[in-house]
Image (cartoon, rainbow, N blue to C red):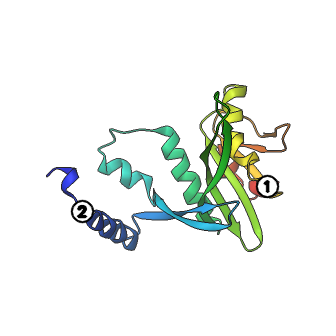
Amino acid sequence: MNSQNIHPETVKHYLEYFEDSFLITKSRRYDVKGKKYISSPQKYYFTDVGLRNARLNFRQFEETHLMENVIFNELLIRGYNVDVGMVEENIMNKDKTKTQRQLEIDFVCNLVSKRLYIQSALSLPDKEKLQQEERSLIKTKDSFKKIIIAKDNPTHYTEDGILILNLFDFLLNENSLNE
């Protein structure tokens, strides 16, 4: 069967079946500045990455995607409502015209009146990668806590006040987001 012959409604029903069977969890897209949900494609995370890996016969090992999935699941375990954030950025082109582009914030986490913005990054090897991960967080222009969870970096704050939180510090310390 050619994948182009699958009707979108069929895909939608299968995703709903997977959600109902607790194999995947949906995360909705949220416009941070407009303070509303966007009807654009949702993002899905596996409830158990081991089942995902077994289904793929352990052939696909994308550490960045697995790390993001594990962080998502841990945030749910800690009681947060987790959405995928979107912020717009205006870019000046060489011909002096402006272009708008959407930036993604991996997780917008809400727990009662508390909100956190979290980016997931396997590593931050240089200033360029750090700036790339910080860009969407800085564009929110509000006072909620902003965090980048990185596997290969020690926990510290950046010059812009963004917490770089080591992945293992995050996973092993349930209060790590409060520090």
Residue type at numbered disc 2: His
Please determine whether, in this image, residue 134 is positioned above or below residue 2.
above
Quadrant in which residue 143 is drawn: bottom right
Residue 128 horizontal/vertical position (percent): 69, 27
Q: Amino acid at mark 1?
A: Lys
Crowdedness of circle 1 by 10 Å Cα count: few (<14), some, many (20+)?
some
Could one spot residue 166 in this view of the protein? Answer: no
What SS does tag 1 mark? Answer: strand
C-alpha gap between disc 1 and disc 2 = 41 Å
For residue 16, say whether it is visible: yes
- The percent position of residue 81, horizontal first and vertical second, equals 62, 68
> Considering only order in the chain, which callout, 2 or 1, is on the residue closer to the N terminus?
2
Question: Residue under circle 2?
Answer: 7
Residue corresponding to mark 1: 145
Residue 89 lies left or right of residue 71; in this view the side is: right
- What crowding class fits label 2: few (fewer than 14 Cα within 10 Å), some (14-19), or many (20 or more)? few
